[in-house]
Image (cartoon, helix red, strand yellow):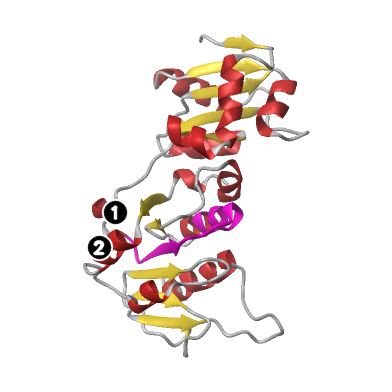
């Protein structure tokens, strides 16, 4: 099993991996960074071997690490052994994971989605916070959703922060990017209910009729769902606020909606 050893912080390969913290570099290379053996294992379970597997010199032996090395080489990837200082530099953490992976991004085309393959799907308009997006991807995975559709100018789902928040679900959930015009045209063929959320809605999320497959449409953290997309929904609902807070975090609200749409499964 061939492994390359890198000890210099100025090595070109190290610089290239560090650059994946920048969106322009991720988009230019079509790759992203995932940290930790658990994440690597989730990727392998979804037949997603890394392009590059970075292993710390102090990484402990583990059957999953052996599997990761074998599958990386089988897929034509590279194994690089690095120092703790390099892991810190790449992860921007004082206590980094001892195994990192560079993976290819994967987006599902909008017209290739099969609504009937899952009881519920999630669409997000202009979501801005990577932690919210990552948590929503993880929630969609946990609830058995078909995928997450990103509409308009959304945060990058493959940013380091978003990927961390998915806890590995980034490899299991279908992710699609589209613009509002294409989404609205595609929405006309949706066989179930399209359900939006608005603070000014009068229908409760508990009483709304949601025919499966349900498409849950959530808006931006600050402004909410735009009028244009809200008008394309079969029903707009609200989640009642019973205390002093006037709204919920986007990821929490999405989780409530997803489970409301699937609570009898």
Q: Is residue 118 above or below residue 102?
A: below
- Whether residue 184 sits left or right of residue 13 in the image: it is left
Residue located at (62% from left, 28% from top): 99
From mark 2 to mark 1, how far is it between C-alphas? Answer: 8 Å
Q: Identify residue for label 1.
A: 110
Q: Secondary structure at mark 1?
A: helix
Q: Is residue 70 above or below residue 225?
A: above
Is residue 58 in view from this perspective?
no
Residue located at (66% from left, 17% from top): 82
Residue 61 magenta-highlighted: no
Extent of the magenta region? 118-137
Q: Position of residue 107 (x, y in %)?
A: 37, 44
Q: Residues within 10 Å of mark 2 (few under 14, many from 20)?
A: few
Question: Is 246 in front, or is 69?
Answer: 246
Q: Identify residue for label 2.
A: 186
Is residue 53 in view from this perspective?
yes
Mark number for residue 89?
Answer: none
């Amino acid at each position: 099993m061939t492994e390359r050893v890198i000890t210099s912080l100025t090595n070109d390969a190290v610089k290239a991996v560090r650059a994946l913290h920048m969106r322009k570099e991720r988009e230019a290379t079509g790759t992203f960074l995932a940290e930790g053996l658990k994440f690597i294992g989730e990727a392998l379970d979804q037949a997603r071997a890394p392009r590059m597997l970075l292993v710390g010199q102090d990484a402990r032996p583990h059957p999953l690490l052996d599997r990761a090395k074998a599958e990386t080489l089988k897929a034509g990837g590279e194994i690089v052994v690095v120092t703790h200082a390099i892991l810190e530099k790449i992860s921007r953490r004082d206590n980094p994971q001892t195994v990192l992976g560079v993976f290819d991004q994967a987006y599902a085309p909008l017209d290739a989605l099969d609504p009937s393959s899952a009881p519920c799907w999630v669409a997000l308009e202009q979501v801005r916070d990577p932690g919210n997006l990552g948590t929503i991807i993880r929630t969609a995975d946990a609830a058995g959703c078909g995928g997450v559709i990103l509409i308009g100018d959304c945060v990058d789902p493959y940013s380091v922060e978003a990927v961390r928040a998915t806890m590995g679900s980034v490899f299991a959930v279908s992710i699609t990017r589209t613009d509002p015009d294409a989404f609205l045209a595609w929405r006309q063929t949706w066989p179930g209910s399209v359900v939006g959320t608005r603070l000014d809605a009068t229908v409760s999320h508990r009483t709304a009729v949601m025919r499966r497959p349900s498409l849950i449409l959530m808006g931006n953290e600050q402004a909410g769902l735009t009028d244009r997309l809200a008008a394309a929904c079969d029903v707009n609902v609200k989640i009642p606020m019973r205390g002093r807070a006037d709204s919920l975090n986007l990821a929490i609200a999405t989780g409530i909606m997803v489970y409301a749409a699937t609570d009898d499964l």
